[in-house]
Image (cartoon, coloured by chain):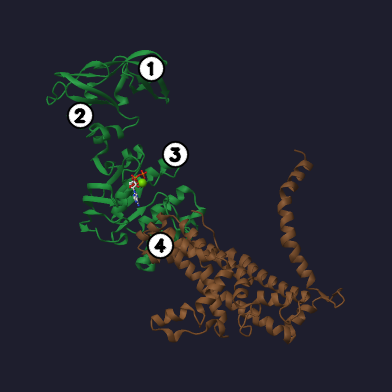
Chain colours: A green, B brown
């Protein structure tokens, strides 16, 4: 296994800059997840690492080796595609062995590696089947098997679970996590799914419009988002944002009411700030801290917990998690509070203020 | 819905197709086969003669020599299409589907253009181009110092059929190209990416991944070529007339049938023998298509992506 170092990578298609100044370190044996809105360049970055797209500027090393000008097959990577991209005209074994045969690996070695991968992924009974005779989950495992047999330095996954149904997705997620432990593999993994990102990742990389907004441990991103984008992207339902401005020392005027918070000393009266509070850190009724007046718009009940959509006097809607059986109905006037310690503060440029 | 109403509805929907197909396809076919069992007498009546028209056609030297000549020529005509037209169509399709290609639509249209032109126009233009007297082909070759290569290709027994076949290839190469191109487009890019990661270059990915996946289309193209070639008539007739000269060297089943059935110059039309030839053509094509359907196609898998 090896570490991947990406240094000031840029990628453009014609005049369109898709990736700008990407700096990223994927530690040896770590599981890095790329997340971000659709079209932000996650797949493009992954394909650049794979060597399927030439990079326009910058460099990249895999295991200390500059790979900028190496073709994909020489980079010692393996990629699992969203559509699995199995060769339809070959059976499972043929699919897994194809790349090795091309690389001139000895027959016995190929047999051994395929058998090993088939054992790990429980594909042994399926080796003679063609892809179209397999279920979605089985195809997924074959695609992973095809990656394993290459014994790559780095595994690249592009939304590998998005074609599976919900139950299978959870299963496969767990299996990928186990596989990561078992193979002690370096993995770069693209996903749309927050839960996948939070549960699998050693490091989450949040991308937006071709830039990395923040990279860090899942909980760091959750507790200390570096900016408004990351704050809004990580967590579901998304963080509530309240626009406001500093009125005096430790006081903020936001959401139509004056709130007292512990503000950092760098905040001067008149500064515009944005307060961010996660739904799970809000409380209906009494709370240790500032209170907002609101009207209940809608309550979504999920069982153990639920979400209350609350309309503030300014017309803005915020979402608060509710536990147990809330006695409120649509139209009720209530007050909602939040813990000031759990409140994130961002400056006018959207950067986090500590 | 009652059973009668259902059957009635079925009949109403099937009727147009059945009527048109029967009138214009099945009836003429059956009539031709029927005709080939009769011999038209001088007094205008027809006499049932069983298979004797066929025995005449295959054993009487005055009939069998032209028949086998036409058959051989036709096989050659088909072979040239298979060996030249379809490989070129495949290569053009592969080039057209290259990821980085400008003017794709222009090439596609230009290559397909001759297919849309009238055969008569094509035949006439090529006759002018290849004419030893004023054809541009001769000047063109001379310009490159290759004038010695030029010959009256359409007028020599040894080259007439080959020349006409190549003109036909030039005209119709667009059809295999479009069919194969469409099949290539259906192959997902990710599959080729996977092959690239597996260490194949563009060319190897084409041979080992794309080609096996478009085999069904190649089969289809082959069988279409076969049917079209054994039904061919118009280009040879337009360029060489019904005699398909010189000395019948470009004679194929279609032109032979035309001369026999409708008559030509001093040869009187003979509907019975003409029908026998037409039936033979039908049987040849039927055999070819059967082989394709029951032997080749069964072994091929169609893939959906
Ligand atoms: N071949 C290409 N030519 C031009 N632009 C491209 C090409 N491929 C991708 N793009 C552009 O690059 C941007 C990033 O695409 P990419 O596929 O990396 O997004 P993504 O983050 O993977 O999105 P998704 O989550 O929807 O898969 C998009 O705006 C897309 O339009
Ligand atoms: Mg993508």
Q: Are marks 1 and 3 on the same chain?
A: yes
**A159 w.r.t. B211: above or below:** above
Instruction: Identify the mark at residue A97; answer none if there is no mark.
Output: 4
For label 4, the SS is helix
Instruction: Identify the mark at residue A348; answer none if there is no mark.
Output: 2
Instruction: Identify the mark at residue A166; answer none if there is no mark.
Output: 3
Q: Judge left or right: residue B151 versus residue A336.
A: right
Dividing the picture into quadrants, the one containing residue A280 is top left
Mark 1 neighbour density, 10 Å: few (under 14) some (14–19) many (20 or more): many
Q: Is residue B58 visible?
A: yes
Quadrant where the N terminus of chain B sits is top right
Q: Which callout, 4 or 2, points to the residue nearer the camera?
A: 2
Mark 4–mark 2 CB contact (< 8 Å): no
Q: Are marks 4 and 3 on the same chain?
A: yes
Counting residues from the start of the chain, the first of labels 4 and 2 encountered is: 4
Residue under the image location 36 percent in, 55 percent down: A147
Q: Residue furthest top?
A: A333
For disc 4, the chain is A
Front residue of this view, candidates A313 and B17: B17
Mark 2 neighbour density, 10 Å: few (under 14) some (14–19) many (20 or more): some
Q: Is residue A95 visible?
A: no
């Amino acid at each position: 296994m090896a570490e991947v170092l990406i240094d000031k990578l840029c990628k453009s298609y014609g005049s369109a800059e898709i990736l700008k100044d990407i700096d990223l370190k994927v530690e040896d044996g770590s599981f890095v997840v790329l997340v971000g809105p659709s079209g932000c360049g996650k797949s493009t970055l992954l394909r650049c690492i794979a060597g399927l797209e030439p990079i326009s500027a910058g460099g990249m090393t895999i295991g200390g080796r500059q790979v900028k000008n190496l073709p994909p097959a020489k980079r010692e990577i393996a990629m699992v595609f969203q559509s699995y991209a199995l060769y339809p005209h070959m059976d499972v074994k043929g699919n897994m062995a194809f790349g090795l045969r091309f690389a001139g690996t000895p027959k016995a070695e190929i047999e051994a590696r395929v058998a090993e991968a088939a054992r790990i992924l429980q594909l042994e009974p399926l080796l003679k089947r063609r892809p179209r005779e397999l279920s979605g989950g089985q195809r997924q495992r074959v695609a992973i098997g095809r990656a394993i047999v290459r014994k790559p330095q780095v595994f690249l996954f592009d939304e590998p679970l998005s074609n599976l149904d919900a139950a299978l997705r959870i299963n496969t997620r767990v299996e990928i996590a186990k596989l990561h432990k078992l193979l002690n593999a370096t993995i770069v993994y693209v996903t749309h799914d927050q839960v996948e990102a939070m549960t699998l990742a050693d490091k989450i990389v949040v991308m937006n419009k071709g830039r990395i907004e923040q990279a860090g441990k899942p909980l760091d991103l959750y507790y200390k988002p570096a900016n408004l984008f990351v704050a809004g992207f990580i967590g579901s339902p998304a963080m509530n944002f309240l626009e406001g401005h500093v009125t005096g020392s430790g006081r903020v005027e936001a959401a139509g009411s004056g709130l007292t918070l512990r503000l950092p000393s760098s905040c001067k009266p008149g500064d515009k700030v944005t307060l961010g509070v996660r739904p799970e850190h809000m409380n209906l009724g009494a709370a240790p801290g500032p209170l907002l007046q609101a009207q209940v718009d809608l309550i979504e009940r999920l069982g153990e917990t639920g979400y209350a959509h609350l309309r503030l006097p300014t017309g803005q809607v915020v979402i608060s998690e509710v536990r147990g059986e809330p006695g409120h109905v649509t139209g009720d006037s209530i007050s909602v509070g939040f813990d000031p310690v759990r409140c994130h503060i961002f400056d006018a440029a959207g950067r986090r203020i500590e | 819905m009652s059973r009668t109403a259902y059957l009635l509805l079925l009949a109403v929907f099937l009727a147009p197709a059945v009527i048109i197909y029967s009138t214009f396809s099945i009836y003429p076919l059956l009539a031709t086969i029927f005709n080939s069992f009769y011999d038209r007498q001088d007094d205008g009546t027809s006499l049932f003669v069983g298979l004797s028209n066929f025995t005449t056609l295959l054993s009487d030297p005055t009939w069998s020599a032209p028949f086998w000549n036409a058959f051989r020529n036709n096989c050659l005509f088909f072979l040239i299409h298979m060996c030249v037209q379809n490989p070129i169509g495949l290569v053009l399709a592969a080039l057209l589907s290259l990821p980085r290609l400008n003017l794709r639509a222009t090439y596609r249209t230009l290559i397909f253009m001759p297919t849309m032109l009238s055969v008569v126009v094509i035949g006439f233009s090529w006759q002018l181009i290849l004419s030893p007297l004023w054809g541009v082909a001769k000047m063109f070759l001379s310009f490159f110092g290759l004038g010695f290569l030029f010959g009256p290709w359409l007028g020599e027994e040894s080259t007439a059929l080959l020349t006409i076949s190549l003109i036909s290839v030039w005209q119709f190469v667009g059809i295999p190209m479009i069919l194969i191109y469409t099949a290539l487009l259906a192959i997902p890019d990710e599959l080729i990416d996977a092959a690239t990661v597996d260490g194949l270059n563009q060319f190897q990915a084409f041979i080992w991944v794309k080609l096996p996946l478009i085999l069904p289309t190649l089969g289809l193209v082959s069988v279409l070529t076969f049917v079209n070639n054994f039904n061919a008539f118009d280009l040879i007739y337009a360029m060489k007339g019904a005699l398909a000269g010189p000395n019948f060297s470009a004679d194929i089943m279609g032109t032979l049938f035309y001369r026999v059935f409708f008559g030509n110059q001093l040869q009187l039309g003979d509907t019975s023998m003409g029908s026998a030839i037409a039936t033979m053509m039908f049987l040849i094509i039927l055999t070819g298509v059967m082989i394709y359907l029951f032997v080749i196609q069964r072994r091929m898998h169609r893939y959906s992506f």
